[in-house]
Image (spheres, helix red, strand yellow):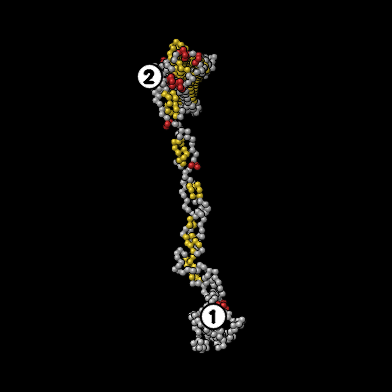
Amino acid sequence: MRKQLAIGVSVLALTALGGVSENNFISDNHSGVHSQYTHFVRTSLNQFEPLSGASLDVGLPYRTNYQTAGVYFITGKDGVSFGDGKENDFSDPSGENCKRLGYTVTSCDSGLFNSACPYNDSIYDRCCEATYKYTSSTCTNPKTLSSDTCGGKHRCYCDSSKYPHTSCNDPQIKGNACTDDTGTRYATCTCPSGVATPYGCETYYASPCNSVCQKAYADNCRNRTAVQTPYGCESYFSDCSSKCEKAYPDNCRNRTAVSAPYGCSEYWSDCKSKCKTAMASCEGEIKSKYPNAVLVTNFAELSSNAMSGKDVIVMNNISNTSGTLYIGNGTKIFSADKAGSDLCSKTTITANVVSLNGASEINADVKASTNLTFNDASVTGNGALSASTIGLASNSNSFSGGSLTADTLTMPTKCSFTISNSSLNINKSLSFEAASHLTINGGTHNIKTMNFSTNSSYTATEFKINKASISMTRDAGAYYFYPIGATDDGSSPIKITLSASTFDIGGGQINYDEGKNENKKMTFRLENGSKMTNIGGIVCWGGSGLGFVLAANSNSSIQMIGKTGTCNGTPTIFSASNTSQEASVILGSDASGIMIFACMWKVPNNTYGDDLCTRRATCTNAKIQ
């Protein structure tokens, strides 16, 4: 606080002072001082003191030869002592006056105050914050001018409702900014946009953006397993181009096949469909396929005992119409063409007698000029075996695959023969001796005639047909044709059983002659949907015991054909020598199947019994005489 003291001086009229009057004022050049602090002073002529020039630096005319006048104040005592000054009172009453008006602050850290005391401009009512320094013209967007003031000024601040964030956590992106005296604020803190993740996310941003993908997987390889590619990769995964989805199965794309007009002896190890080394001949190809086989070219080599148990390949046609060829004991015989090469010509084997012994495999066409004998033989393969006569020299024999053709086949007493999945062709007759057994499984067969012999000393003779088809063919122009006949007078039964098979008699008659067995010596039994068709008639000469049995629930049937009108012309024959003899059909309990009898005609001139022409038989459980 600056204190000013202005003293009005009354000067005696002295000659040295230019005749100044005592009642005049000494004027101060500092404006406002004398008007506020004007004191009336009287002087005494005997109070003159010398003044230094330095004390008169307030604008008074400088004089070196002067005397001071006596000074009297209107306050306190009317006199002033310039001795020790203890009686002088120079205290300032403005502090008390300001306090009464509420001005009590004497210092502000910010240097800003609201208003000063009218008695003392160093005393204030309150301090202002340093931020109260703006006017509407100095507070610019986006800041906001405060509605309140201090010292006549406003604050200029960032509105926290519009700029709520003082900072943003990485990796957040800062929005619009506003900076005021307190710092910078942001309108938004947002996470960055995530990358597309067609194959999933590899890396996420840090919190608080840990749900946003920062780096996506470039492909789906982590979920793919590559296949082994010894010959290279044919195709890769569409979502993982570095891993093979499908490998080449071989190296054929890099292999070139050589020309092989005679076949291929060696294929590429990594490409089985392309020939590496061509075959020079039929023989070369066979040797490559059957490296351990014996290749024969003459009858002597073929019939040698050394052939037993080996793979034998006939390289050319071999024929000896006077010799005997033995095949068996584990031999596998092939014709060159059936060894598997198109380079080889078809070859056949011809001998006078062919003897089949033990187990063998025949993949060749073998012909016997006279006899083909099965001697405890088990023959497989795909060859065609033919002979004038086929005979059995032992009790048990079998033939499977291929075909078996002969004029005659004789089934000796107590011998058995099983033919499976083959073709049996008998051009003249198939003969059954007593107690012989023939079984045919599958296949299609042709047999001209069948003859059965019986004997009272033996058990039944059996012919079993299982899932096969047998046809018998009638000679053209023949009036009487007996494809099946039993002519012996023995008493052993004959059993012919059909299961799921078809037996076509070809329009001929079933002839049963000299039968004496009253218990149906010859019986046809049909099971599992079997059929006997085209039976031209049944003839019984002097005997009895011919029967047909259709098994219950089998849906089997018997068909007899012939003239159905009168007895004239060519009727179906169903006859017996007398009324005591009989032929019967026994139907199953469900009356399954169909049996059609045409005109039942007696023997001419009524020689042998009743006139059957007027009889008609239907599907009944009746015996027909």
* Percent x, y of residue 317: 42, 15
The label number, if any, that marks residue 52 in the structure image: 1
Residue 520 coordinates in the image, percent (x, y): 50, 19
Quarter of the image for the N terminus: give it.
bottom right
Residue 569 badge? 2
Q: Is residue 40 above or below residue 162?
A: below
Residue 555: % across, % down: 47, 28
Task: Name the image quarter holding residue 570.
Answer: top left
Residue at 48 percent across and 55 percent down: it is 173
Q: Residue at x 49, y 40 (%)?
A: 224
Image marks 2 and 1: residues in contact by CB distance under 8 Å: no
Q: CA distance from mark 2 to mark 1?
A: 194 Å
Residue 608: give its label: none
SS label for mark 2:
loop
* Crowd around label 2: few <14 · some 14–19 · many ≥20 (10 Å): few
Q: Earlier in the sequence, mark 2 or mark 1?
A: 1
Q: Amino acid at mark 2?
A: Gly
Q: Is residue 399 visible?
A: no
Q: Nearer the viewer, residue 182 or 163?
A: 182
Nearer the viewer's eye, disc 2 or disc 1? 1
